[in-house]
Image: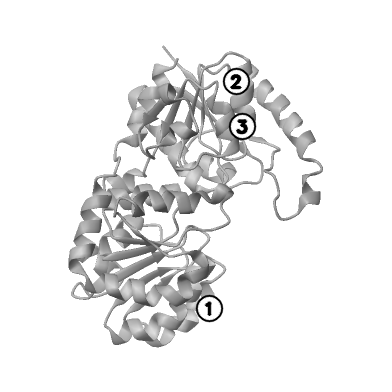
Amino acid sequence: MQRNIIIAGGGTGGHIFPAIAIANALKKIQPDTNILFVGAVGKMEMEKVPQAGYPIEGLEIAGFNRSNIFKNILLPFKIWKSLRHAKAIIKQFKPDAVVGVGGYASFPILRAAQKMGIPSLIQEQNSFAGKSNKILGKKAKKICVAYDGMDKFFPADKIILTGNPVRNNITQSAVTREDAVKYFGLSPEKQTIFAVGGSLGAKSINEALQPLLATLVEKDIQLIWQTGKPFHQMAVTAAAPYASHIKVHEFINVMDFAYKAADVVLSRAGALAIAELCVVKKPVIFVPYPFAAEDHQTSNAMNLVNKKAGLIIKDDAVRTELPNVLFSLLQNKALMQQMEQNIATLAHPNADMDIAHQVLAII
């Protein structure tokens, strides 16, 4: 029997890639499943979802603007309009179930579906649930989470610990460390750091690394540096004298190679990054983005730090603390090994299939 399923949400890669992974898993279980994505007009899902082969509808919706209160004047109207549009999409598509992955478009679609008696499932990626999901959780049939202790946000009997979906090219990668290191033009004999600040780059991480480049080369340590677009040119210039050891990339498409080549990873603490790091089992130093909603990146990182599965440096302290934390970790083989073992226990390589089965179970 053919099923119609709506997957709603997006805004960042952290919401979109898991959503696509869930869609692919649903198709694997039931190939004739009819899937429609709903996103926010002007956001990256409007491009990424069609590239993955799925249709998408866009809602005119934006979030609450914390930095410019005047921009929120039209917000109630936009929410009302997007709720009407969401209702129209649901009436036309007639979904058997609706899945919310977080992001602006998630709320209007799930709210409308719940009012119309259509079963809904929330995929909460962070360890600190956002306001919208807390409201929607009351009427959702199931809530798939990635962290323990989520019953402080949601009804305990609806929670299922599935983890966050990770892209197949990472969970099923067969690349060897030797091939990975060679791909970046580096030496397999030397220790390697992979610094990554999400798809747009991380200003504080980039600015903390720049003055460290000479020291890295002195210590014969290699760096794979994903800078993001805004910082790329500066990093290329800064790294030019150290080309043998420092490899600068604006964006890396083959993340499995970068992870495999690394002895230590320096990263933001978004839900997707953490899910990937657990699967690839790497010692990690987190620098959480402090302006994420409800400061959820700090909460995500602390969940691992408390299990001795990661280290943390606050965003505003990264310039002063990074050299000490980074170099002492690279020298401490026992600690690196312990962190690898601990982070590995938190991996959920089959999260996409587990969530897809839960979606089909609520229909």
- First-in-chain label (2 vs 1): 2
Point 39% across, 39% down: residue: 146
Colouring scheme, one of rainbow, by chain, secondary structure, one colour: one colour
Q: Amino acid at mark 1?
A: Met
Q: In what element is the residue under mark 1?
A: helix
Report the mark closest to the observer, 1 or 3. Answer: 3
Circle 3 residue: 107
> How far across and down, in percent of the image, does residue 182 sit?
25, 69
**Up/down of 191 relative to 350, above or below:** below
Circle 1 residue: 234
- First-in-chain label (3 vs 2): 3
Local crowd size for mark 1, using a 10 Å CA cut-off: few (<14), some (14–19), many (≥20): few
Local crowd size for mark 3, using a 10 Å CA cut-off: few (<14), some (14–19), many (≥20): many
> How far across and down, in percent of the image, does residue 264 sit?
30, 65
Report the mark closest to the observer, 2 or 1. Answer: 2
Nearest the camera: 306 or 243? 306
- Would you say 139 lies left or right of 356 here? right
Q: Amino acid at mark 3?
A: Phe
| Disc ID at residue 354 | none
Point 27% across, 51% down: residue: 343
Q: Quadrant of residue 333?
A: bottom left
Circle 2 residue: 113
- Would you say 226 lies left or right of 350 here? right
Residue 56 seen anywhere in this rendered image of the structure: no
> How far across and down, in percent of the image, does residue 122 sit?
49, 29
> How far across and down, in percent of the image, does residue 11 sit?
58, 45
